[in-house]
Image: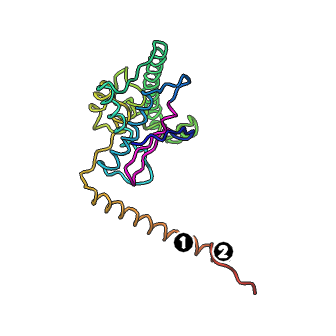
Amino acid sequence: MIFSGKKSAKVNGLYKCSTHEILIHNRNFTRDDGTCNENLLMYTAIHELAHHICNTELGVRGRRSHTQLFWSTFHDLLETAQEKGIYTLDVDADTRQYIDQARELSQKIAALQRELGKVLKKINERCEQQGLRLDDVTDRELQLSRKTVLKSIAAYNENFPADIGVDIQEACVQKPNDREKILNGAAQGKSIMQLKRPPLSVLDGLDRLTTEKKRLETTIRSLSLRLAEVVKQLEEAGQDPPGKMRVAS
């Protein structure tokens, strides 16, 4: 880990995959009185450590660095840091009141989503009796996306507890087989990213690279075929494809 001794308006820190270095712009955490906000500095350091773990231990590669796996790993580290007392998430009484209000609103939204699902099921029954398509009613009359319709009906069918939040409810709907695991984790205070953590592959680093190579090769073949189609269509339309110069007659 390296302290740059500088202040950056763009980032508080960064991780260099090639050298496995963590760079912290420590002057970003200097208060007006000259003291250091060590808690926020620790938060940034743990964030970059999560990148290092994903890169070295979990074999994560690719352009996307802030994946679901990253955030779940990061939140695991924050929990450990809090248990060890090297990072805290202490809020004052007023902020705690707002947090409680937000949690209550999230629970109300989840309850309303279940209520919407109940009404949509009744509409579906009426549509079937009248020979109508539910999709047409929800698309044009209700102006609801089909994703919202299916999600709401599924939430109603599951009969969730009243104190569940909207994102926890959605996670259960997306992964019905993991419902109890998700609900138990939520009760323990796990973040939504921890609850939706993708399963870690048993593949080693070489197998991961081989899998990525196959995926990239498939993408390249698909793009090459599409490029050939576009070039042919341009030629048939009497236009030169990009990169080809027309010679004047």
Q: Position of residue 236 (x, y in %)?
A: 63, 77
Query: Can you tell which quarter of the image residue 122 is in?
Result: top left
**Counting other residues with Cα less than 10 Å from the Cα at mark 2, is it few (<14), some (14-19), or many (20 or more)?**
few
The amino acid on which the numbered mark 2 sits, given as a three-letter code, is Ala
What segment carries the magenta color? 12-29
Q: Which residue is at the front of the view, 215 or 158?
A: 215
Q: Is residue 17 magenta?
A: yes
Does residue 201 belong to the magenta stretch? no
Name the outermost residue toward the bottom.
249
Q: Are marks 2 and 1 in contact (CB under 8 Å)?
A: no
- In this view, the residue farthest toward the top is 93
Q: Nearer the viewer, residue 123 or 115?
A: 115
Residue at numbered disc 1: 229
- In the rendered image of this protein, does residue 174 appear above or below residue 207? above
Q: Is residue 159 visible?
A: no
Q: Element at badge 1?
A: helix
Image location of residue 119, percent across then percent down: 46, 28
21 and 208: which is toward the camera: 21
The foreground one among 145 and 18 is 18
Instruction: Return the residue at label 2.
Output: 237
In the picture, the quarter occupied by the C terminus is bottom right
Q: Position of residue 238 (x, y in %)?
A: 68, 77
The local secondary structure at tag 2 comes to: loop
The answer to whether 161 is drawn above or below residue 191 in the figure is above
